[in-house]
Amino acid sequence: MVSRGRKRVFLGFSIIALLVLFMGSLAILYVISKGRPQLLAWGLLIVLGAVFVFLSTGILSLTGALIWNKGIPWGITARAVAAIFPVSLKLAKMFGIEEDVVRRSFLQVHNELTKREKSRLTSQEILVLAPICLQKADCRYKISVEVSNCRRCGRCPVNGLLALQDEYGFHLAVSTGGTRARQLVKELKPKGVVAIACERDLASGIQDTRPLKVLGVTNERPRGPCFETEVNLAEVEEAVRNLLGEQESICLPKGNMLEEGASS
Ligand code: SF4
């Protein structure tokens, strides 16, 4: 799932963001030491220092865990990753790096963290959320209203998702956009979600639904964005099995996790 991209991209920009924060704190300290200490400057320094300690603890423990494949302090790491992601995205833009490259990397890190927090949900507690763009453009069946309206002709991946639903028994819903997806999550109240979408929608959806357990699977867009997209059903199945606790990270190599996806 989210098999493309490298974790090191996100980690690299996160570390740069930490350095920027550290340099900013030093600059404030320098200004304070040169003039009369001002309450506002000291307050700012304390806040920046606290943020720096929090973020660096999370990011450094994440980096160490990915390199040595060890356990992580889940709470602080997940929060630090969520907090630093928007900053990493902005920094990447400044460096002329495509935002989707950073988003893919973030999704890999996020999925890795989510998988490490062991879960054993029932199939009824799992929602597989698919985008409407998986459907054939000329298909007239209203699957966004009720996915069982699909006639299973096999021309699009919805057929395969329904076959997986038959096998595992999870909830399956098709959304027409990000707002509808969030609405479905509110209505169905799942304990775990396998979300299929593009990098941008996955990254924002994951941030918005935190702390819900979400595994992201990026769709493929051979015909351009939002049009008759595809999805790797094996990745969806692996994510479902992971939430069920049936299988532990079958896509993950045993060695250095930072190398995962490096060959892609
Ligand atoms: S499998 Fe066929 S009937 Fe079902 S949504 Fe796709 S195109 Fe429509």
Image (cartoon, rainbow, N blue to C red):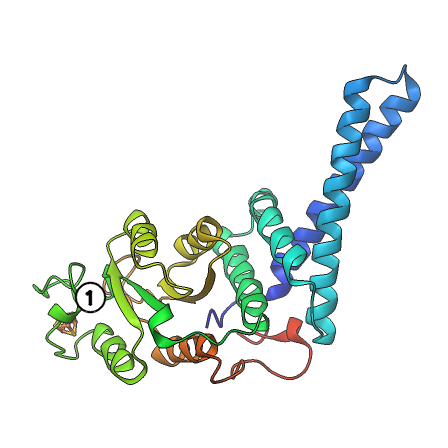
| Residue at the extreme top of the image, as rendered | 36
Residue 149 falls in image quadrant: bottom left
Is 153 situated left or right of 189 in this image? left
The mark total stands at: 1
Q: Residue at x 60, y 47 (%)?
A: 83
Asked if 38 appears above or below 214 in the picture, the reply is above
**Nearest to the observer: residue 145 or residue 121:** 121
Asked if 176 appears above or below 24 in the picture, the reply is below
**Crowd tier of the residue under label 1, counting other residues whose Cα lies within 10 Å: few below 14, some 14–19, many 20 or above:** many
Q: Residue at x 75, y 36 (%)?
A: 48
Residue 126 placed where, x, y %?
37, 69
Asked if 216 appears above or below 83 in the picture, the reply is below
Q: Residue at x 68, y 82 (%)?
A: 255
Judged from the image, the quadrant occupied by ligand 1 is bottom left
Residue 261 falls in image quadrant: bottom right
Q: Is the residue indicated by label 1 positioned so its CB lies within 8 Å of ligand 1?
A: yes
Residue 41 placed where, x, y %?
79, 22
Q: Secondary structure at mark 1?
A: loop
| Residue at the extreme left of the image, as rendered | 140
Is 131 situated left or right of 211 in this image? left
Q: Where is mark 1, residue-wise?
A: 135
**Nearest to the observer: residue 67 or residue 9:** 67
> Is residue 216 among the parts visible in the rendering?
yes
Amino acid type for the residue under numbered disc 1: Gln
Residue 15 placed where, x, y %?
71, 52
> Is residue 88 among the parts visible in the rendering?
no
Residue 161 placed where, x, y %?
27, 76
Is 98 situated left or right of 40 in this image? left
Is 168 situated left or right of 5 in this image? left
